[in-house]
Image (cartoon, rainbow, N blue to C red):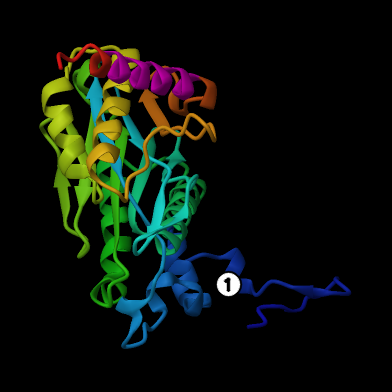
Amino acid sequence: MDNTFPRAGFSGPGLPASYFSPASSSFADFVRAQAPELLPARRVPSSGAGELAVPHGTTIVALTFAGGVLIAGDRRATSGNLIASRDIEKVHVTDEYSAVGIAGTAGLAVEMVRLYAVELAHYEKIEGVSLSLDGKTNKLAGMVKANLDMAMAGLAVVPLFVGYDLEAEDAKRAGRIISYDAAGGRYEENAGYAGVGSGSLFAKSALKKLYDPDADVEAAVRAAVEALYDAADDDTASGGPDLVRRIFPSVVTITAETGAVQLPSEQTAAVAEAVVAGRAERTHHRPS
């Protein structure tokens, strides 16, 4: 599609006038009007799409702590019974105070979360202010709902949202977690922790015992990595810490002071190695 035309005073092609006078603060609405075929939701799946051996990502966990919230994910993507990728990034910072973890069809999920990050940035540039946290979660719900046709064909995307609510009355409890279903349903996770993906059952069972709402960020990161280890221990689609290849979980923390920050690989490696060492020690000291 050619969206260029000669402009007065320019020897080469330029952008159409509509690109300089957006009618909406929504980037997705703008693309829908100018180039709708570029949106993932406008692709028409074939009748056999559900049988495609496309990579799927799991597992994502999120939990709040005193003064913030974090989200973490393993790095494995699977295609049927095969490992499609060992080091996929499933956790993405989407703006200064939010992040999203993705489970489901990997290609569509990554594309959706990137479009979502652009959507938030576009809104802020047009309106001059950031969306409220509720506005951010509702915007993501709409994008998931727009993918319903693909989900019905077996290509579902299920995100997990975390954000720091700058308008919260209690700064220590300002971290929030929002989960979604494949149809765009939005659910506030009031227990303080949540998980999505095939290993989430085991991860949430671990967090049920490990979760401490008054924990500091270091203890919360340790609990998240412990939960991902338990998920990988029982779910073949989830990847545990890979000490040989040096592949470790992705972790993003969000606080009022630092905003959304992805932890350096050296820090997550140290936590993961401590978790593995602790499990090995308990196993070796188990009575025969």
- The part of the image, by quadrant, that contains residue 43 is bottom left
Q: Nearer the viewer, residue 175 or 7?
A: 175
Amino acid carrying mark 1 in the image: Ser
Q: Nearer the viewer, residue 28 or 94?
A: 94
Magenta highlight: main SS = helix
- The part of the image, by quadrant, that contains residue 24 is bottom left
Quarter of the image with the N terminus in it: bottom right
Quarter of the image with the C terminus in it: top left
Q: Taking 75 as reference, is 71 above or below it?
A: above
Which secondary structure, mark 1? helix
Residue 278 on the magenta segment:
yes
Q: Residue at x 65, y 75 (%)?
A: 16
Q: Nearer the viewer, residue 236 or 73?
A: 236
Image location of residue 121, percent across then percent down: 49, 47
Image location of residue 138, percent across then percent down: 25, 52
Q: Taking 175 as reference, is 99 above or below it?
A: below
Q: Is residue 180 left or right of residue 260?
A: left
Q: Is residue 244 left or right of residue 257?
A: right
Image location of residue 175, percent across then percent down: 25, 27
The extreme front residue here reads: 288
Image location of residue 119, percent across then percent down: 45, 54
Q: Taking 77 as reference, is 225 above or below it?
A: above
Which residue is labeled 1 in the image? Answer: 18
Q: In the rendered structure, which segment of residues is drawn in magenta?
A: 267-281
Q: Residue at x 17, y 21 (%)?
A: 210
Residue 24 on the magenta segment:
no
